[in-house]
Image (tube, grey):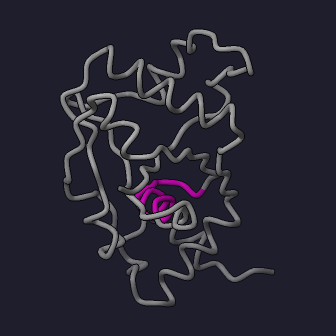
């Protein structure tokens, strides 16, 4: 089994060492579903976290920091979370097939997922990618030919291709 990468807004997760209920804002904003699904990116190991971030960053409208957590895929399947392979919406064509949907979700599933994420936060397993790191990821993908810069939003393309002064 692999790992699943999910973007979060750290400010919404008021997590302490004490096990307390998860804030509603963390669930309603970081775990916002569409058609009862939640989008994630699958990686083979924790060292590949940048692949999931690249897939997300390449489809963003703006270049900004991204915080992500990685959850073990087997942990979610053991919690009866359905994981479906679906094509990802990213201009990184070699990453499209690494997209997954956590599907057929209900409120109990969201509680389980939020507890899994909170456990990662408690274990200090949040990966922060600054705008500078994301720019470097995007440039590497462009230079390797795995990302066509024309497929980036105008704002991101301008910032990524702008020479450093």
Residue 135 horizontal/vertical position (percent): 62, 70
Which residue is at a point 20% across and 53% down the rendered structure image?
85
Camera-side residue: 88 or 123?
123
Which residue is at a point 40% across and 38% down the rendered structure image?
75
Check the image and name the residue furthest to the right.
165
Check the image and name the residue furthest to the bottom.
144
Q: Quadrant of residue 159?
A: bottom right
Q: Quadrant of the C terminus?
A: bottom right
* Side (left or right) of 28 relative to 91: right
Q: Quadrant of the N terminus?
A: bottom left
Residue 98 lies within the magenta run: no
Residue 19 horizontal/vertical position (percent): 64, 14
Q: How many marks?
A: 0
* Side (left or right) of 139 relative to 37: right
Camera-side residue: 158 or 125?
125
Which residue is at a point 22% across and 36% down the rendered structure image?
82
Residue 47 horizontal/vertical position (percent): 57, 66
* Side (left or right) of 130 relative to 105: right
Residue 141 horizontal/vertical position (percent): 49, 80
Which residue is at a point 33% across and 62% down the rendered structure image?
90
Above or below — where is 39 with respect to 85?
Answer: above
Magenta segment boundaries in residue numbering:
52-63
């Amino acid at each position: 089994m692999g790992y699943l990468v999910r973007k979060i807004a750290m400010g919404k997760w008021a997590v302490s060492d004490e096990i307390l209920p998860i804030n509603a804002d963390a669930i309603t904003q970081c775990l916002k579903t569409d058609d009862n699904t939640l989008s994630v990116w699958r990686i083979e190991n924790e060292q590949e976290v940048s692949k999931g971030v690249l897939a997300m960053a390449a489809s963003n409208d703006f270049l900004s920091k991204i915080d992500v957590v990685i959850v073990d895929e087997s942990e979610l399947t053991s919690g009866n979370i359905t994981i479906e392979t679906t094509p990802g919406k990213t201009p990184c064509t070699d990453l499209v097939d690494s997209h997954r949907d956590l599907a057929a979700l209900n409120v109990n599933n969201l509680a389980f997922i939020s507890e899994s994420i909170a456990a990662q936060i408690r274990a200090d397993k949040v990966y922060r990618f600054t705008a500078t790191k994301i720019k470097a990821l995007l440039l590497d993908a462009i230079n390797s030919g795995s990302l066509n810069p024309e497929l980036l939003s105008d704002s991101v393309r301008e910032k990524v291709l702008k020479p450093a002064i």
